[in-house]
Image (spheres, rainbow, N blue to C red):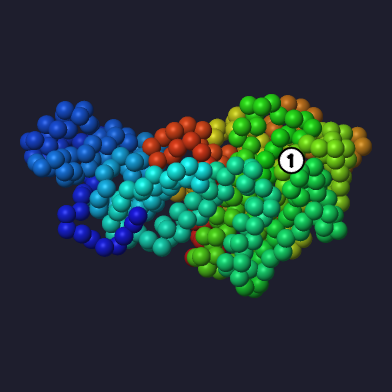
């Protein structure tokens, strides 16, 4: 919890760099210096020491920041582990921070208190309150945490409950909350409404595929469209995945989850844009009417696609969504998708891959992402690989003819469906923490929401 109320007896949290440790320790009393020595604390990154009072209560907290100038030497992730390590109480920062750093700390404090307890007996939450540091926009921090928590809840929910209908219902609920104009196209209606690729991917599931489309804001404002991949479970289709590769496939709707969290934050902040959100929601299942390797399917844009692999389904539902979005020539079109394993091989789980037709916009988003501890990495739309998507019987194949550059060729596939948008950003993300860290347990991660929100705010609201 965060509060603007100060309190007598609030426990100070000291932030200590390794280089400043000796000077800081010298300012303390002898018993405290001895306590720090006994605990071996020297300001190491993420180390926490509780400093006791004479009665045994906690009188202060020391949090190590590591060496100055380290990558992410001050980020929200330093604070996320504190809620699990501290006893109940009211806390405040012992020193003043610049507003960006103070905001990172406040966000991390709140973010670290996330719990997903839908399927187990909940553990009583500790009362941990941080006095908001001076200059921090409390409403903004709470807004972005709520957006991240929404995305994490959606991704953490298993596929038996997070069906295409459930994902569409979640999107519709957000649309209704903010009074959006919205529609949901379901099942065979997708064919009548010219979304044949979405229908082809999702038709084998017991839960019909669907597409949610909602709009918010003044039509006179710049048009910003968000598109999220909503594959609620990916078996791989008839090109079935090995069992081990299916274990995390409930997270294959992570792009849609991030888009919905971002949309919620945009609308709560009332950013001056005309927002459109498109979420194709499907399950890539196996049954007698599943689409097959070698099939040729139609798309909204009119391009035919030969299916080289049914496990490359995300780009198929995205291409119909991109074609729909591109028709109204938005100022900015952003798609987010857990699209390729190749992006993870290249950049790992913590660094989403960014592709764009606008290098200046991509560079600005990368800069903002680093500042917000929500990083991305700009990858090339290398035209030399475009011919690897060729087909002898259709306009294109959905996979490359080579085993190389999978993230790039997937982005090049999508690029063929974007002609009119002024700026297009494609983000290939992971949406998952694969290892336990303080305040960042194994499970869903809300990647790119803060970076994109700050980017949109800077682009349109300042």
For residue 292, side relative to residue 183 (left or right): right
- The answer to whether residue 378 is seen in the rendering is no
- The answer to whether residue 284 is seen in the rendering is yes
Location of residue 446 in the rendering, given as x and y in whole percent from the top left corner: 52, 46
Q: Residue at x 51, y 65 (%)?
A: 268
Q: Residue at x 59, y 50 (%)?
A: 257
Residue identifier under label 1: 284
Given residues 253 and 157, the one toward you in this image is 157
Location of residue 35 in the rendering, given as x and y in whole percent from the top left corner: 14, 33
Q: Residue at x 81, y 37 (%)?
A: 287
For residue 182, side relative to residue 260 (left or right): right
Location of residue 388 in the rendering, given as x and y in whole percent from the top left corner: 79, 33
Query: Which image quadrant for residue 378?
Result: top right
Q: Residue furthest left?
A: 30
Number of numbered callouts drawn = 1
Given residues 333 and 51, the one toward you in this image is 51
Location of residue 154 in the rendering, given as x and y in whole percent from the top left corner: 57, 48
Query: Which image quadrant for residue 344?
Result: top right
Given residues 111 and 414, the one toward you in this image is 111
Q: Residue furthest front?
A: 121
Q: Give the answer, above or below, for where 156 lies relative to 139.
A: above
Classify mark 1: helix, strand or loop.
strand
Would you call the spot at circle 1 few (<14 residues within 10 Å), some (14-19), or many (20 or more)? many
For residue 39, side relative to residue 452 (left or right): left
Q: Residue at x 38, y 51 (%)?
A: 110
Query: Which image quadrant for residue 134?
Result: bottom left
Quadrant location of the N terminus? bottom left
For residue 234, side relative to residue 120 (left or right): right
């Amino acid at each position: 919890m965060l509060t603007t109320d100060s309190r007598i007896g609030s426990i100070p949290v000291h932030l200590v760099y390794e280089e400043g440790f000796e000077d800081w320790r010298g300012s303390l009393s002898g018993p405290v210096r001895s306590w720090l020595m006994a605990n071996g604390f020297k300001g190491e990154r993420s180390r926490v020491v509780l400093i006791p009072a004479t009665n045994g209560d906690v009188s202060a907290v020391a949090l190590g920041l590591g060496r100055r100038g380290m990558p992410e030497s001050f980020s929200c992730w330093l604070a996320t582990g504190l809620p699990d390590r501290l006893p109940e109480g009211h806390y405040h920062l012992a020193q003043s921070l610049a507003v960006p750093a103070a905001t990172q700390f406040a966000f991390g404090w709140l973010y670290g208190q996330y719990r997903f307890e839908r399927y187990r007996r909940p553990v009583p939450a500790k009362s941990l309150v941080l006095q908001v540091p001076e200059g921090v926009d409390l409403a903004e921090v709470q807004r972005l945490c709520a957006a991240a928590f929404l995305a994490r809840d959606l991704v953490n929910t298993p596929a038996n409950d997070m069906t295409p209908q459930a994902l569409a219902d979640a999107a519709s609920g957000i649309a209704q909350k903010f009074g959006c104009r919205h529609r949901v196209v379901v099942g065979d209606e997708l064919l009548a409404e010219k979304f044949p690729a979405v229908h082809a991917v999702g038709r084998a599931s017991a839960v019909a595929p669907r597409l949610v489309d909602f709009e918010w804001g003044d039509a006179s404002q710049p048009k910003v469209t968000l598109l999220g991949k909503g594959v609620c479970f990916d078996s791989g289709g008839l090109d079935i995945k090995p069992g081990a590769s299916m274990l995390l496939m409930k997270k294959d709707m992570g792009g849609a989850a991030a888009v919905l969290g971002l949309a919620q934050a945009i609308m709560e902040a009332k950013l001056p844009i005309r927002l459109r959100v498109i979420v194709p929601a499907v399950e890539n299942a196996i049954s007698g009417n599943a689409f097959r390797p070698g099939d040729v399917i139609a798309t909204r844009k009119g391009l035919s696609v030969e299916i080289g692999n049914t496990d490359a389904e995300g780009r198929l539902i995205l291409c119909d969504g991109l074609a729909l979005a591109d028709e109204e020539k938005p100022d900015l079109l952003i798609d987010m998708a857990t699209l390729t394993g190749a992006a993870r091989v290249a950049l790992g789980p913590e660094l989403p891959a960014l592709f764009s037709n606008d290098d200046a916009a991509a560079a600005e988003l990368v800069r903002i992402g680093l500042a917000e501890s929500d990083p991305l990495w700009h990858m090339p739309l290398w035209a030399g690989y475009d011919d690897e998507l060729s087909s002898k019987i259709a306009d294109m194949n959905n996979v490359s003819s080579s085993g190389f550059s999978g993230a790039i060729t997937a982005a090049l596939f999508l690029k063929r469906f974007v002609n009119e948008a002024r700026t297009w950003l494609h983000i290939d993300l992971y949406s998952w923490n694969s290892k336990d860290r303080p305040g960042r347990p194994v499970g869903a991660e809300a990647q790119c929401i803060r970076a994109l929100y700050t980017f949109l705010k800077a682009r349109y609201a300042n």
